[in-house]
Image (spheres, rainbow, N blue to C red):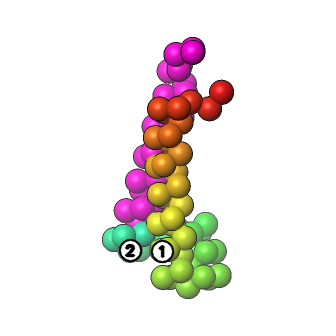
Amino acid sequence: MNPMETAEYLVLAIFVLSGCVSLAAAIFNFDWFFQSRKAATFVHWLGRNGARLFYGLLGIALISAGILFFFFGYR
């Protein structure tokens, strides 16, 4: 089993960090997040609460992927 390189740790950290931001935005209903151009598309399609649910689930998925890849690898 090969040890992970620094770049791989960085990618996993980005997964977990972006998941935390997405999940926090969904929980605390951050206006700056949901009024951004890209998130506003999902707000338009799903409504504000639907977009919050989507980004909450996305955050959980990103955090889970980062943690699982850290422990089990992806090779």
- Between marks 2 and 1, how big is the CA–CA gap? 7 Å
Give the residue type that dot 1 points to.
Arg
Does the magenta run of residues contain 48? no
Instruction: State whether residue 15 appears in this view.
Output: no
Please tell me how crowded label 1 is: few (under 14), some (14-19), or many (20+) other residues with Cα within 10 Å: many
- Which of the marked residues, 2 or 1, is nearer the chain's N terminus? 2
Residue annotated with mark 2: 29
Which secondary structure, mark 2?
loop
Marker disc for residue 52:
1
Q: Quadrant of the C terminus?
A: top right
Q: Answer above or below: position of 14 versus 51.
A: above
Does the magenta run of residues contain 4? yes
Q: Quadrant of the N terminus?
A: top right
Residue occupying image coordinates x 48% and y 49% = 64
Give the residue type that dot 2 points to.
Asn
Q: Main secondary structure of the magenta part?
A: helix
Q: Which x, y percent locates residue 18?
A: 47, 50
Is the C-beta separation of discs 2 and 1 under 8 Å?
yes
Q: Answer above or below: position of 73 versus 20.
A: above
Q: Which x, y percent locates residue 34?
A: 49, 72
Residue occupying image coordinates x 52% and y 51% = 62
Instruction: State whether residue 9 appears in this view.
Output: yes
Q: Which residues are magenta?
A: 1-25
Residue occupying image coordinates x 47% and y 57% = 60
Which secondary structure, mark 1?
helix
Q: Answer above or below: position of 51 versus 66.
A: below
Q: Which x, y percent locates residue 52?
A: 48, 74
